[in-house]
Image (spheres, helix red, strand yellow):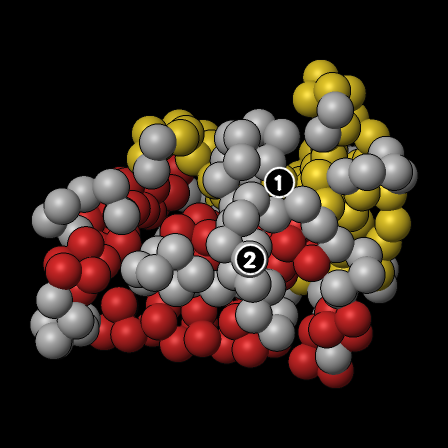
Amino acid sequence: MKKQIKKVTAEIPIWGTIVWIECYGENMEYLQKGLQIIKNDFKKIDETFSPFRLDSEVSKFNRDSTNHPSELFSEIWELCKNAKSLTEGNFDAWCSGKYDPIGIIKGWAADRAVQLLKGFGATSIQVNAAGDISLLGGYPNAKGIMPWKIGIQNPNNPNEIVKVIEIHTGAIATSGTYLKGPHILDPKTGLVAIGALSATVVGPVGALADALATGLVVAGREGAGWFAKPELAEYGAWVVDRHLGTAWSIGKV
């Protein structure tokens, strides 16, 4: 007898946005338990890393760097250092003069949520943290397991989808100034980044994809030679130029 696959969804308000979760598995009760744990985990992440909370660990560290860091804090610190090195400083969590890992947190948290749900029996998962998306297992329908189809918005017209990425398992991260305004700084100048209008990165790890997308918005086409490093061979990017109104890609996207 064929087992019935059940669908569970959730919308979690956190980090000033809504995280959308869609997952499939045989045991709905287990999936619901997993979602509740994720909600609590997201709150813990916010309490640790939010630069907008005076009581967060990041805010306390920026006031007094002698505070002993938690294991979670140390993990993200190392991820930020690695991303800064790989992007040759175009992603820099310290560029504002204070430590702010927000540019890597959503992708990392989406990956973390996928692994938590997998532990509760989910076989197909999509976690969308406002454009930072982690995926597992493909999308189940009557025809079988199909790739997830993720639409990329035209940064000049968010109502228009200009590219569709098909993927079973992995991460997609999009960065740009067209929705949130000029919030990405160029670490080298301290001014608003003008390298690209938007960048979408596809790869196996959400935290790094998140940082790479930000780095490409800063670097633009002429400064993106670092993306060809062997360590990034599993990542691809699709980037919209700021000045020319054209798009270009690196690797398989």
- Who's the residue at 57% across and 28% down the image? 179
Q: What residue type is labelled 2?
A: Thr
Q: Mark 1 points at which residue?
A: 176
Left or right of residue 252, residue 21 in this image: left
User: What is the CA distance from the residue labelled 2 to the residue labelled 1?
Assistant: 18 Å
The residue nearer to you, when weighing 141 against 9, is 9
Expressed as whole percent of the image width and height from the top left, the position of residue 14 reads 32, 35
Given contact means CB atoms under 8 Å apart, are the residues at marks 2 and 1 in contact? Answer: no
The dot on residue 108 is: none
The mark lying in front, picked from 2 and 1, is 2
- Left or right: where 100 falls relative to 214: left
Task: Count residues near mark 2 (Cα–Cα under 10 Å), then give few for <14, some for 14-19, many for 20+.
Answer: few
* Amino acid type for the residue under numbered disc 1: Gly
Q: In this view, does 24 lie above or below 66?
A: above
The answer to whether 5 is drawn above or below residue 76 in the figure is above
In percent of width and height, residue 7 lies at 50, 33
Q: Earlier in the sequence, mark 2 or mark 1?
A: 1
Residue that carries the numbered disc 2 in the rendered image: 189
> Could you say which is closer to the camera, residue 57 or residue 34?
57
